Image (tube, grey):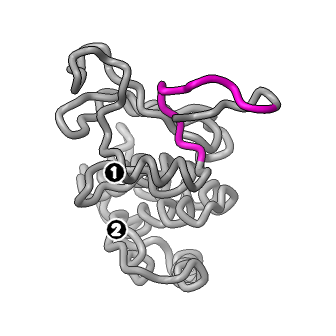
Amino acid sequence: MVPLLAYPLGLPMSEQTKRNDLDAAIGLLLKQGSGAMMTTSLYPAIAAELGDRALVDTLLPLSYRDHLRPPFDALAETPTNQAVHFLTGAGAFLQQIVFGWSGLRLGEEGLRPAFRPVLPTRIRRLVLRHVAVRGRVFDIVVEGDSARFDPHPLSPSPSGRGGTTGLPSSPLSAWRRGGQGVRTRRERGKGPGGRARWA
């Protein structure tokens, strides 16, 4: 439970504290079993925030496999009970994708990039389709360690002319200034060595 102070609660702490809490929880997970799915399914989101792809790979199957029940692979609350169609656990599993692998966080300023995306090794590309952000709709495309917000064709443009993402400017601008690699369609050309230069 302690790692949940980092995510989803978002309590400020050092990376080392976050990692120590997660390591201790994983030790208990391996020793005692996973318990409620809604808790252990969030651990990969914290591993992604720490930039630890190997740990994301390790935790992914542990977050759901023991919870599957035949014949339709319904999700159970714990590995040992039959409380199936456990929506809280399914929601936690989806959070590791949306708020873990993608590097996104939802806060008072809206949906924003918070850290570099970390996809599991066997997943090359993730597309979150039709995501509503401040009155506009985007497809969020994650490839490698970058993410971009592509305006959905049916989404209204804030200026009526298109060409901008319509995202709150400050978090995304700060992300770009920090060199974190979030990419939008506002590319202004290529920089030295053929590297993309982003607005």
User: Mark 2: few, some, or many residues within 10 Å (few <14, many ≥20)?
Assistant: some
Residue at 41%, 26% in the rendered image: 150
Residue at 59%, 66% in the rendered image: 50
Q: Mark 1 against mark 2, which lies toward the viewer?
A: 2
Q: Nearer the viewer, residue 121 or 184?
A: 184
Q: Is residue 35 left or right of residue 196?
A: left
Q: Nearer the viewer, residue 199 or 149?
A: 199
Q: Nearer the viewer, residue 111 or 39?
A: 111
Which of the 4 image quarters holds residue 80? bottom left
Choose the circle earlier in sequence order: 1 or 2: 2
Residue at 69%, 25% in the rendered image: 190
- Amino acid bearing label 2: Pro
Judged from this view, the residue extending furthest toward the left is 135
Count the numbered circles shown.
2
| Rendered location of residue 151, percent (x, y) | 35, 24
Which residue position is annotated with label 2? 8
In this picture, is 37 found above or below 17?
above
| Rendered location of residue 152, percent (x, y) | 32, 20
Span colored in magenta: 181-192
- Amino acid bearing label 1: Leu
Camera sees residue 165: yes
| Residue 23 sits inside the magenta stretch | no
| Rendered location of residue 192, percent (x, y) | 78, 32
Q: Is residue 8 left or right of residue 25?
A: left
Secondary structure state at the residue bearing disc 2: loop
Which residue position is annotated with label 1? 75
In this picture, is 72 found above or below 94?
above
Secondary structure state at the residue bearing disc 1: strand
Which of the 4 image quarters holds residue 96? bottom left
> Considering the image in quadrants, where does the N terminus appear?
bottom left
User: Mark 1: few, some, or many residues within 10 Å (few <14, many ≥20)?
Assistant: many
